[in-house]
Structures are given as C-alpha cells and as structure tokens.
C-alpha cells in the first residue's frame, strides 16, 4: 500500500499533496481520538471535530500517541509545526496548537514510531542516528518535556543499508 501512496503523491501537485497530507492527518487524528477517547470528542456521529485546528505540519506524520491529558504526540518526516522548528517529533495541545512546553528534541532524521510509557516518558524509533548531540541509533527515550532522557543509553541498533529505516514500531511490554 505504501508504494501506491507514494506513486500517487508524486503525480499530484505540491498543493494537492499538502491537502492530502492534511486531510489524512486530520482523519487519522479524528479516528484515533474517537477510538481512544469515546465520549470526549463531540464528533461521535462521525463529523469532524472542528475544535481541533490544523497544526500545519510541513511534512508527513507517521505516528501519534494520545496522552491522558488530551495532548497528542506526533512523529514523522517534518521539521516544522506552524512557524516553529520541530525536528520530527512534537506535541500538540488538545485543540491542535503546538505545545511549546515540549521542547524540540533535535532528532536528525525521520521518526516512524512512538510509545508512551506510564510515567509520561516517550520512546521514539525510526531512521535517526542523533538526538541533539548524542548518538542514539534508531531508538531513544524522551522526558515529558521533550528533552532526551540521559538515563536511557544508546541501544546501538545497527543496519545494513543506511537508506533503510529500521524501527517502524515500538511496543511496551509489562515486566
């Protein structure tokens, strides 16, 4: 399915691709909120929740996680949310605006996966090598404020082909 989507997007104009991305993001977000928080979204009948604004992400969003306070973590292939530089990971307020209390973790390449821990820390996975000035090959953990969790060491996830993203999904397992 991904190959078909990529081919379709390449044939569309830049404006049309942006509309597709925004529409896909809104649909994904609305569906996720309806499933994760039934009753908390006024769009129970399937209507679009108009209280959630367009965050104006300048690229693709591949993963999202809903926090218990209604804030939404997003990850993907973007470097800007609205007019603010946010490298591949950001947090949105419940109304869709950028949560500026969540700092820019300075990830150097795309993030494909998010996992929200019960303590509020966030595991990220993707094709990245650096988080800020620290080598964190493909997997890292962020604190609740978006800074890198320094107690989480470099997992040293290796790869055979630099252009092949390795971490597409993360799952937390209770111990």
Image (spheres, rainbow, N blue to C red):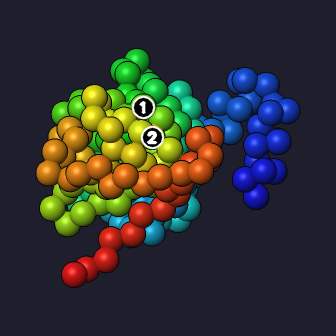
Image disc number at residue 108: 1
Q: Earlier in the sequence, mark 2 or mark 1?
A: 1
Q: Please tell me which residue is depicted at 29% across the width and 49% down the height of the picture.
A: 154
CA separation in Å, label 2 and label 1: 6 Å
Coordinates of residue 62 in the picture (x, y in percent): 53, 49
Crowd band around label 1 with a 10 angstrom C-alpha radius: few (<14), some (14–19), many (20+) = some
Closest to the observer, 35 or 65: 65
Write the residue at 50% across / 44% down. 127
Q: Is residue 158 above or below residue 39?
A: above
* Residue visible at 47% across and 35% down in the picture: 109
Is residue 137 visible in the rendered structure shown here? Answer: yes
Closer-to-camera residue (128/52): 128
Q: Secondary structure at mark 2?
A: loop
> Quick check: 166 left or right of 130?
right
Q: Position of residue 87 (x, y in %)?
A: 40, 30
Q: Quadrant of the C terminus?
A: bottom left
Residue 14: % across, % down: 72, 23
Relative height, residue 54 to residue 2 (above, below) = above
**Image-based side of 138 in relation to 22, left or right:** left
Instruction: Tell me which corner region of the image, top left, top right, bottom left or bottom right, holds residue 19.
Output: top right
Residue 128's disc number: 2
């Amino acid at each position: 399915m991904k190959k078909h989507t990529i081919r379709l997007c390449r044939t569309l104009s830049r404006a049309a691709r942006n509309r597709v991305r925004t529409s896909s993001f809104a649909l994904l977000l609305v569906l996720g909120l309806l499933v994760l928080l039934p009753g908390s979204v006024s769009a129970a009948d399937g209507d679009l929740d108009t209280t959630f604004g367009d965050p104006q992400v300048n690229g693709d969003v591949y993963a999202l996680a809903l926090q218990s306070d209604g804030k939404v973590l997003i990850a993907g292939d973007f470097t800007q949310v609205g007019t603010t530089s946010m490298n591949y990971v950001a947090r949105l307020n419940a109304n869709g605006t950028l949560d500026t209390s969540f700092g820019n973790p300075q990830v150097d390449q795309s993030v494909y996966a998010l996992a929200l821990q019960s303590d509020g820390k966030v595991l990220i996975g993707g094709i990245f090598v650096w988080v800020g000035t620290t080598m964190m090959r493909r997997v890292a953990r962020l604190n609740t404020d978006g800074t890198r969790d320094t107690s989480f060491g470099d997992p040293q996830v290796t790869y055979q082909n630099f252009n092949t993203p390795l971490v597409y999904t993360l799952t937390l397992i209770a111990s």
